[in-house]
């Protein structure tokens, strides 16, 4: 599988906002956006006007990078969202939020989505008591997600959970901090998700 090996902070600077790819660093004054809020490269500080296609492309790239998906993965998920009843853009966001690696991140088991993905791949996550190591697994409302006993002793995971607890958990997740487990109560409503995401631009791009 293709991997992005350059600085993740460059991705945030390219999109012009925090994508929260580096864990705790994103919440500190060390965040690259705080110091250099312009695209990387020698022409980064030159302001140019984007075409309609450019605006749509940037929104798609931003959303794809937030959740750490490759283009093929993202497009396939969009096709699934388009087949479901309801609004395609909202379906897409709910599916992205329901990915196991994202739920593991929101529960604080990993400091970032990439770290949460690694935890899933290392067989550390149980879904309803069964081990699941597929980051793209779509969690259903009512599912119980927990760490296995060995992983509960990891200092990094404990530290990550403490930070997540201090920030607060989403309303659609019910956490048992001591037990290091949580329930995915329901799929989030559109109003629960960031207003900085404009999923309609992604739909327009893929509808061409």
Image: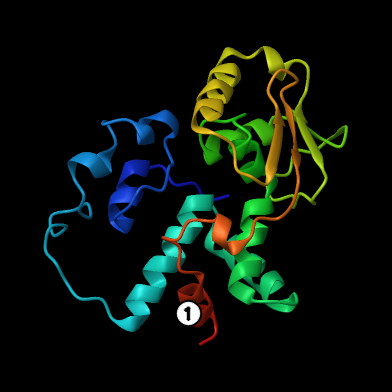
Taking the image as shown, residue 140 lies to the left or right of residue 192, namely right
Residue 85 in the image, given as x and y percentages of width and height: 75, 77
Residue 66 in the image, given as x and y percentages of width and height: 48, 51
- Choose between 55 and 170: the one closer to the eye: 170
- Choose between 107 and 173: the one closer to the eye: 173
Check disc 1 and report the residue beneath it. Answer: 205
Residue 75 in the image, given as x and y percentages of width and height: 59, 69
- Choose between 88 and 171: the one closer to the eye: 171
Q: Residue at x 63, y 14 (%)?
A: 154
Q: Residue at x 58, y 13 (%)?
A: 155
Residue 13 in the image, given as x and y percentages of width and height: 28, 50
Q: Residue at x 26, y 31 (%)?
A: 29
- Choose between 136 and 42: the one closer to the eye: 136
Q: Quadrant of residue 55?
A: bottom left
Q: Quadrant of residue 6?
A: top left
Taking the image as shown, residue 15 lies to the left or right of residue 48, namely right
Residue located farthest toward the right when viewing the structure as drawn? 129
Q: Residue at x 42, y 59 (%)?
A: 62
Taking the image as shown, residue 43 lies to the left or right of residue 192, namely left
The kind of secondary structure element at disc 1 is helix
Give the crowd class for mark 1: few <14, some 14-19, many >=20 residues within 10 Å.
Answer: some
Is residue 3 shown above or below 158?
A: below
Is residue 61 shown above or below 86?
A: above
Taking the image as shown, residue 26 lies to the left or right of residue 203, namely left
């Amino acid at each position: 599988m293709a991997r992005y090996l350059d600085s993740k902070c460059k991705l945030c600077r390219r999109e012009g906002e925090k994508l929260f790819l580096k864990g705790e660093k994103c919440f500190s004054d060390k965040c690259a956006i705080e110091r250099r809020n312009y695209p990387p490269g020698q022409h980064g500080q030159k302001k140019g006007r984007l075409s309609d296609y450019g605006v749509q492309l940037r929104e798609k790239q931003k959303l794809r990078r937030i959740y750490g998906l490759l283009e093929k993965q993202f497009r396939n998920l969009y096709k699934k969202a388009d087949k479901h009843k309801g609004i395609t853009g909202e379906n897409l966001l709910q599916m992205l939020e329901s990915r196991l690696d994202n739920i593991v991140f929101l529960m604080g088991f990993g400091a970032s989505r990439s770290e949460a993905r690694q935890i899933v791949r290392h067989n550390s996550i149980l879904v309803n008591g069964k081990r699941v190591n597929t980051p793209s697994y779509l969690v259903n409302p009512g599912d119980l997600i927990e760490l296995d006993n060995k992983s509960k002793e990891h200092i990094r995971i404990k530290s990550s959970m403490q930070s997540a607890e201090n920030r607060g958990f989403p309303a659609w997740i019910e956490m048992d901090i001591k037990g290091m487990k949580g329930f995915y109560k329901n799929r989030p409503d559109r109003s629960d998700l960031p207003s900085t995401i404009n999923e309609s631009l992604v739909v327009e791009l893929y509808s061409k």
